Amino acid sequence: MWRQSLLLVLAVAACNKAPIEVSRGDNSSDYNHAALQHAVDKFVAQGRTPKAYGELATTMLVLRPGMDRAVGEEAELRLVVFALGPVQAMSGKPMSEQIDALALTVWPTLLAPEIAADEIARKRPEKSLELYPKPGEDTRTFMLRLCDGPLAHQCQRIVPEHQGAVIAALAIRRATERTRNAVGACRMCATEPGWHESVRQWEALDLLAAGSIHDVERQADPDNWPTAGKASEADPGLPEAEINEIGQVVISGQRYSANRRVEALKDLRNDQPAIALHLRPELTLAQVKGVISDARKSGATKIAVIARSPRYPWDRRIYWVADGVGTRAGLRATDTLQLLLDAVDHVAGPGAIARVD
């Protein structure tokens, strides 16, 4: 029932935001238009921040049952246009900062159904409420739930550390569509170019996000990591480097070719004895042995390979690997890293060292 849905929204507001005083206005002759304007004024006075936007969006949901179609359409227009400022302010910043600022405040509203489409006599679908954070959820828990629930089709096959980029792109795409529709349905907007400029600005953000999202989806597929079994251990958070398709060492997005790999790994290690390597599961043991040799030359005395649990949320695990010591698997140099780890799973437990030679 809508009343139950409304209570959930209010609970979210109580747990995540300062209390919001609004009039339900169910019998108001202005269909909550004055309350809507008051909420907008408050948002502007608070500096149009992501937090202020989250309060505005929650207020809109509380007021929605008392709105008629015209006020609902105005609320929809204002919500999608006002979201532009917080999103633009965070654009270009590290994804971790965007997640902290936008995941619980702006993205849920942009991903949800339009306000104007939710007629007074209809219930808002219960599924749409799953797009909003639940009481007590932090950003990681919220995004993991989204990608295992209402957004499963879009991001369940994305490892958790890259889900933010995918959800951000989905929110921007949805905001672009909603802004086009809201401005197109607005009669007064025809003579005010600012509304149409907001459409163009959302389109620019959408184009920017779309330009990189396919690479993110490709790189974040869990199949890019070996599958973890019983000989793996929980990831301890070691300094990490990736070996890409052409053998370059990749650290924090920076690529290092053959003549700089050892130096890059030494800088990564920073006097720590152990490092972790992101190696593709189809690498041959001969290739893995070469990477281990570079890691040894950098001064690393312990080397881990990052793996993924076989089911969502693709938890990070590690295997210890070495040449010259460890559990023998009786494999050839042309066999794959995944085959080695599978063999070790059958004969050893957590903490075993997988011998690559």
Image (spheres, rainbow, N blue to C red):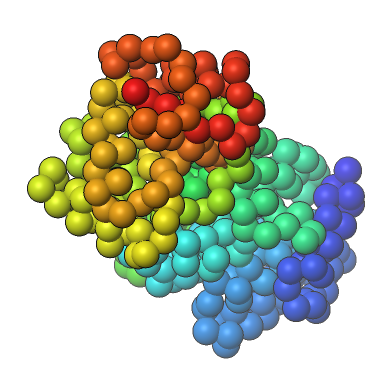
Of residue 261 and residue 325, the one placed in the foreground of this image is: 325
Locate residue 146, reporting x and y percent.
63, 43
Locate residue 184, reporting x and y percent.
43, 51
The vertical placement of 138 against 246, above or below, is below
Toward the bottom, the furthest residue is 45
Locate residue 120, reporting x and y percent.
77, 49
Locate residue 243, reporting x and y percent.
28, 39
Q: Name the image quarter holding the N terminus.
A: top right
Of residue 69 and residue 296, the one placed in the foreground of this image is: 296
Q: Residue at x 79, y 77 (%)?
A: 19
Of residue 106 and residue 283, the one placed in the foreground of this image is: 283
Q: Quadrant of residue 340?
A: top left
> Does residue 151 appear left or right of residue 334 in this picture?
right
Q: Residue at x 59, y 71 (%)?
A: 53
The vertical placement of 47 against 50, above or below, is below
The vertical placement of 305 against 187, above or below, is above
> Does residue 202 appear left or right of residue 102 in this picture?
left
Is residue 195 visible in this depiction of the protein? no
Q: Residue at x 28, y 13 (%)?
A: 334
